[in-house]
Amino acid sequence: MSKKTQSITLSALLSALAVASLYIASISPTGQPGLAAFSSLFVTAAVIEIGLAKAAGVYIVSSALAILLLPDKTAPLLYLLFFGYYPLAKSLIEKVKYAVIRWLLKLIVFNLALSVIWFLFSKLFMSFTFESLGIVIVYLAGNAIFVIFDYGYSKLIWFYINRISKSIKKGT
């Protein structure tokens, strides 16, 4: 099989797996943010195996299919608005030399996404408004959770690169 065919096949497979995990999230009564985050691992695998450009295609295709096909839109929207493209952004940000700048960029990406998500979800799903203190608490808690998420995500990427990807390449 040619390299191009392998790349297209892997892109399609990873897109399908992302949509399948988002489907599970959309029918799940709980855990939608966690399963949306899990779905982003397929974009991460695409970044590692076939490159950033094709991984962007996996994100776009899986986002579009999830939004169009899935019954509940909460998990697909979380994926579309943050979790799906974060592996792409993280891949670019991790190339920055200084750790302080990397963290600053990651927090900017997260807070922009949180602001968009907050605005959309508050307009679409919430009939009440938070006071200023509530919004500050949401942002502080969100940033703390994001730092933990990013640290854990980095560990999962390390595991994938050093255990799974190497095993896959050994087998071929």
Image: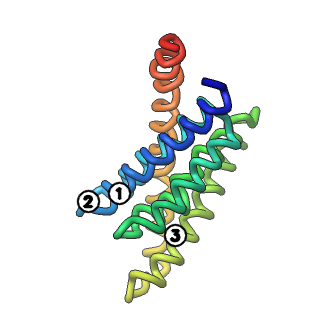
Residue 168, image x, y percentages: 49, 19
Picture quarter with the N terminus: top right
The residue at the far left in this view is 29
- Say which residue appears at 30% left-offset and 56% top-offset: 31
According to the picture, the residue beneath numbered tag 3 turns out to be 117
Residue depicted at 41% across the width and 54% down the height:
36
Q: Amino acid at mark 2?
A: Ser
Question: Which circle, 1 or 3, is nearer the viewer?
Answer: 1
Residue 102, image quadrant: top right
In the picture of the structure, the residue carrying the numbered disc 2 is: 28
Instruction: Name the residue rendered at 46%, 61% in the picture.
Output: 66
**Mark 2 or mark 3, which is nearer the start of the sequence?**
2
Q: Secondary structure at mark 1?
A: helix
Report the side of 141 relative to 8 (left or right).
left
Disc 1: which residue: 23
In this rendering, the label closer to the viewer, 1 or 2:
1
Q: Is residue 90 left or right of residue 165?
A: right
Amino acid tagged 3: Ile
Indicate the amino acid at tag 1: Tyr
Circles 1, 2 touching at the beta carbon (< 8 Å): no
The spot of residue 11 in percent (x, y) is: 56, 41
Choose the circle earlier in sequence order: 1 or 3.
1
Question: Residue drawn at (70%, 41%), measured in percent from left and top?
Answer: 92
**Would residue 146 appear left or right of 109 to someone viewing this image?**
left
